[in-house]
Amino acid sequence: MSPLDSPNTSGPGRLHGAEGGALMALGSMFSIQLGLALSVTALDQLGALGTVGLRLAWAGLLMLALVRPHPRDFTRRDLMACTALGSVTAGMMVFFMLAVSRLPLGTASALEFLGPLAVSLCGPGGGRKRWAAAAAIGVVLLTEPWHGGIDPAGLGFALAAAACWAGYILLTQRVGDTVTGLGGLALSMPVAGILGLLIAAPTDLGHVTWKLLAITLGLAALSVVAPFILEFLALRRLTTAAFGTLMSSEPAIALLAGLLVLSQTLRLLPAAGVVFVVIAGIGATRTGARPTPTARALHDRTPQPQPCPQEAA
């Protein structure tokens, strides 16, 4: 078992509860943004589908090598859930690439974030709905989708990516709860890699060189394996509603990176959007901790009160 997963970890550096889950989610988003910034060479030479296909394929191989899952550790239902998780993972990445090839990036991003925001809004509790609504306002202000037109095919691809992202959040938590360690992720990633290669092979893989293979290997480690492991662990500590709200911070991270690294000016509305999503993220973190496995087990074993005969009558 990983030290991050150990229920007995103690001390000031522990990563339990909502705070630890939030740090992992934020680390995932920073890793993804850094990977995107370094993807320019591969995108120019391989195209969007070729780049994402090779990244997913390398990620699947890396996860198998690092975790080395054993088939005897999985039930048939676990295998089905891991296959479904790999499928939505591939769909989430491929559909988004297809969307941004037809829509302005801000418009595609705003539409894709409907997925995690839907998960947040559908979660229980009025408090979390309030933070999800604040995050939704922030995402719209950040991405300013009204600046671009809507291509019907691009709209469909972006909404498909949003649906896959929602499914990814729910399935990741389900697999993380039923499969010990990172075994579930190690099985789902190769599924995503195979699907990514099958989609990209007819169009964009004819220009592959050894240099591009090495570049996409590094990108897979940075922008797929590391973030997915962090998200996998975060969803063991956060509710899906809180996690979906925290994911809305990604546009803010992208804009702040542009401001600090590329000296891009932050306009008034995007700056206001940053404030909204940061507030939503703090609120979701404070209200979004999941019960520990021990607490959930005790709750399940606690006898529920039975109605008295008079009430039943």
Image: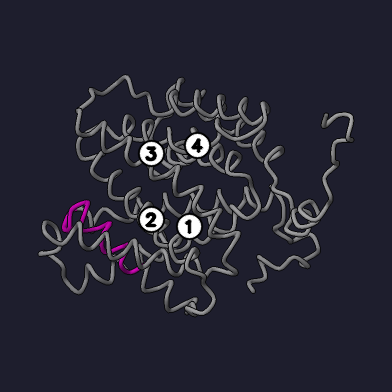
The local crowd at label 3, few if under 14, some if 14 to 19, many if 20 or more residues have their Cα within 10 Å, is many
Residue 42 at x, y = what percent? 23, 58
Nearer mark to the viewer, of 3 and 1: 3
Q: Amino acid at mark 1?
A: Pro
Task: Inspect the image, locate mark 2, and give the three-letter code of the amino acid beneath it.
Answer: Gly
- Which residue is at a point 56% across and 53% down the rendered structure image? 173
Residue named by callout 4 = 248
Instruction: State the predominant SS element of the stretch in magenta.
Output: helix
Q: Which residues are magenta?
A: 44-59
Instruction: Measure the alpha-carbon separation of dots 3 and 1.
Output: 18 Å
Cα distance, mark 1 to mark 2? 10 Å
According to the image, label 2 marks what residue? 35
Q: Tell me the residue at 54%/76% (across/down).
A: 73
Q: Which residue is mark 1?
A: 227
SS label for mark 4: loop
Q: Residues within 10 Å of mark 2 (few under 14, many from 20)?
A: some
Q: Amino acid at mark 3?
A: Ala
How far across and how far down the image is residue 218, in percent?
A: 35, 67
Among numbered discs 3 and 1, the one appearing first in the sequence = 3
Q: CA distance from mark 4 to mark 2?
A: 18 Å
Asked if the residues shown at circle 1 and circle 2 are in contact, with their CB atoms under 8 angstroms apart, the answer is yes
Residue under the image location 60 percent in, 59 percent down: 177
Q: Secondary structure at mark 2?
A: helix
Residue 157 in picture, x, y percent from top left: 26, 38
Front in this rendered view, residue 137 or 199: 199
Q: CA distance from mark 3 to mark 4?
A: 12 Å
Q: Please tell me whether mark 1 sits on a helix, a strand or a loop.
A: helix
Marks 1/4: CA distance? 15 Å
Mark closest to the chain's N terminus, 1 or 4: 1
The residue where tag 3 is placed is 162
Compare residues 312 and 175 and report the one nearer the observer: 312
